[in-house]
Image (cartoon, rainbow, N blue to C red):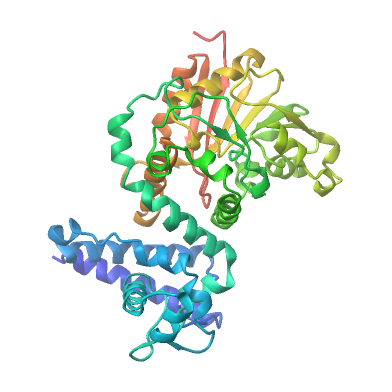
Amino acid sequence: MSSRISELAALVSSNTDRVNHYLASKALPSPSFDENGPVDLKLSPEIEQARIAAIDASTELQALLLGPIDLLRPIINATSLQAIYKYNIASKVPLGGEISFVDLAKLCDMYEPDLRRIVRFAIAYHYVFKEPRKGFVAHSAASRRLVDDEGARDGLGLMFDDCWQSFARTVEATEKFKSQDPAETVSTRLVFDGLKESWQPEQLVLSDTRPKTVVEGWALAHDGMPLYQSIGSNPAKAKRFASAMKSFSSSDGMSASFVVKSFDWASIGDGTVVDLGGSHGQLCIAVAESFPNLKFIVQELPRMVQSVDKSAIPSTVADRIEFMEHDFFTPQSVKANVYVLRQVFHNYPDGHVIKILRQLIPALDPGARILVNDYVLAEPGKTPLSKEKYMRAMDMLMLTLCNSRERDRDDWAQIFQEADARFKFVDAYTPEGSVLGIAEAIWQPDSP
């Protein structure tokens, strides 16, 4: 009988062979840490699954070979990545060349032994930079990307110059603030909810629609200010945040096309769709292009609405998309067939999500649908390990940043039930290939 480690080793080998064969057959470059190594392997969907399978098997194999002792002693130290961002070290290493630690330290105005240990840690743990010969630094593919891609640099800065300090305060926050009551939890809403496809720092606007009580790890690590307040009040951080979010959201899996294809838009005929927190209307544009009989209203806070460039909306759909000032923490006045909330709820604790849903009730007619386009956590062990790790990491990140969370199917059903039993939960699932899921409910006031 083969052991689990032998099975995993075979999976790594067989799936890696599939990836390698595909790259060779398409004359594509093989993965490499070299400076000019590929950033995107350009794999087909089928071979991408083989890549993921190889990663998952190798991750489990490594964990088994490490054993419980080493697994309970992880090296979690973001100092090197924070320093690489803070001192902009990557920009000071010549492309296609090398530089001594001594000269690099002078350019960075750093103590050379500190610079050396920071870079060597990054090489060993993150494959950022290379040391082609003792005492000299050159680029790896990862450090080269920090030179070429502003979004990658800003993402590094956001995560390691801001977020990681907050992780250490998260447990403290859970000890101090246990309530999910909207009257006692996180304070300031920012026009973040709509900034999914058109991140602009000047649109990071505060709206004081909630009480001011600190509850999350971020606030404890940032002078008592919640995430969006601290970012919105600092232009440099707002610019970095906008750039990082645009980079993080650029994958195909975040596309609005999954909502277009997965929901039965044709069933509402010539009805009306309201997109709450819909930014510049990207989702509505995508749906409108495929369903010419529908009308759309994008609701946003005033400054976001004022920033919309209507000339950028395709002329073929522009006359069917209206923009309206509205705060979704206040009662809804527009009657519609479908109310969409895309990447809104994962920014909020349950109490606030329930409050937002209840604000819809005054406008709801029987049969009105609530369509949530947000993360839907898979059941534990029911999805590839790498995907589950990503989702669990997002869930923990939202706890730290906003005292909010990601939700699984049962959570979404419970949220609708607690908001009002007349919300009849339909389903929550993640379309194949999508990062975001879909949760749906129908307003049925007369049902038993």
Residue 272: give x, y in percent of width and height: 74, 27
Foreground residue among 45 and 417: 417
Q: Residue furthest bottom?
A: 133
Q: Is residue 38 visible?
A: no
- Left or right side of 173 for 251: right
Foreground residue among 120 and 409: 120
Above or below: residue 430 compared with residue 326: below
Name the quarter where the N terminus is drawn: bottom left
Q: Residue at x 48, y 34 (%)?
A: 428
Foreground residue among 290 and 420: 420
Q: Residue at x 24, y 65 (%)?
A: 61
Residue 328: give x, y in percent of width and height: 61, 26
Q: Residue at x 45, y 81 (%)?
A: 106
- Left or right side of 198 for 346: left
Residue 299: give x, y in percent of width and height: 70, 31
Above or below: residue 397 compared with residue 265: below
Foreground residue among 413 and 265: 413
- Left or right side of 12 for 366: right
Q: Residue at x 49, y 31 (%)?
A: 427
Marker count (numbered): 0
Above or below: residue 113 compared with residue 422: below
Examine the image and state in which quarter residue 294 appears.
Answer: top right
Q: Is residue 35 visible?
A: yes
Residue 322: give x, y in percent of width and height: 79, 33
Examine the image and state in which quarter residue 289 appears.
Answer: top right
